[in-house]
Image (cartoon, rainbow, N blue to C red):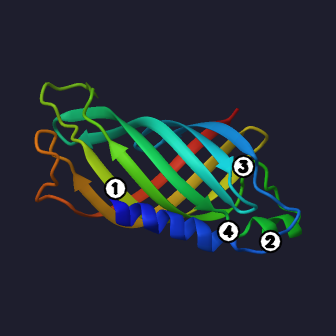
Amino acid sequence: MKKYIVLMCLFAFCVSNSQNSEVNIEKSFVTFQLGTVGVWINNEIRLSDEIALRTEIGLYTEIVKGIGFFMAPEITLEPRWYYNIKKRDSKKLNIKNNSANFFTLKTNFRSSIFEISNYDNKRAENSFAIIPKWGIRRNLGTNFNYELGLGIGYLSFINQKYFTVSDSDGIIIDLHVRIGYNF
């Protein structure tokens, strides 16, 4: 766990040494997003000219063929580096609500506290993931946006009784496709 925190701090420090300019990402905004595997509400807060800290809560969804579906809560924390926001601004492209390409280090906790499901067997498990990702965020008109992202990281299931990791830990591929509304 300490390694992940050190990696996040190092990532934020290295990226924050970029050139200063009058172009900045948004100071703070809230977005509701609907994706292929869930719904989320998130907030991005500017940390520097190109870096934002995104916090997010939501319900992720899994569909199990022949059995049904379930939704369970998740919390995400991720620093985002919008590396081409200045280039987009210099080309007079829309950069409102951080409309740019980004790199991120997504840290995610999924919980089994409750579950919304159409079948009896509980399916959600407590897990923790850390995933380096690349993505794009673009605006659709004034208040709508879409995001696409791809990353490969590590997923660890947490045993509630003994607080240990399980044998099924391993590599995870994170692909997200979302459409959202900016408040």
Residue that label 3 marks: 139
Q: Position of residue 19 (x, y in %)?
A: 79, 74
Name the amino acid, label 3: Asn
Marked residue nearer the N-terminal end (2 or 4)? 4
Marked residue nearer the N-terminal end (2 or 3)? 2
Q: Quadrant of residue 159?
A: top left
Q: Position of residue 140 (x, y in %)?
A: 72, 46
Q: CA distance from mark 3 to mark 4?
A: 25 Å
Which callout, 1 or 2, points to the residue nearer the camera? Answer: 1
Marked residue nearer the N-terminal end (3 or 4)? 4
Residue that label 4 marks: 16
Above or below residue 68? Residue 85 is below
Marked residue nearer the N-terminal end (3 or 1)? 1
Which element type, helix, strand or loop, lies under badge 1? strand
Q: Residue at x 28, y 58 (%)?
A: 155
Which element type, helix, strand or loop, lies under badge 3? strand
Marked residue nearer the N-terminal end (4 or 1)? 4
Q: Are marks 3 and 4 in contact (CB under 8 Å)?
A: no
Name the amino acid, label 4: Ser
- Number of residues whose C-alpha sits closer than 10 Å to that of mark 3, classed few (under 14), some (14–19) or many (20 or more): many
Q: CA distance from mark 3 to mark 1?
A: 28 Å
Name the amino acid, label 1: Ala
Name the amino acid, label 2: Lys
Q: Residue at x 79, y 40 (%)?
A: 142
Residue that label 1 marks: 129
- Number of residues whose C-alpha sits closer than 10 Å to that of mark 1, classed few (under 14), some (14–19) or many (20 or more): some
Residue that label 2 marks: 87
Front residue of this view, candidates 108 and 160: 160
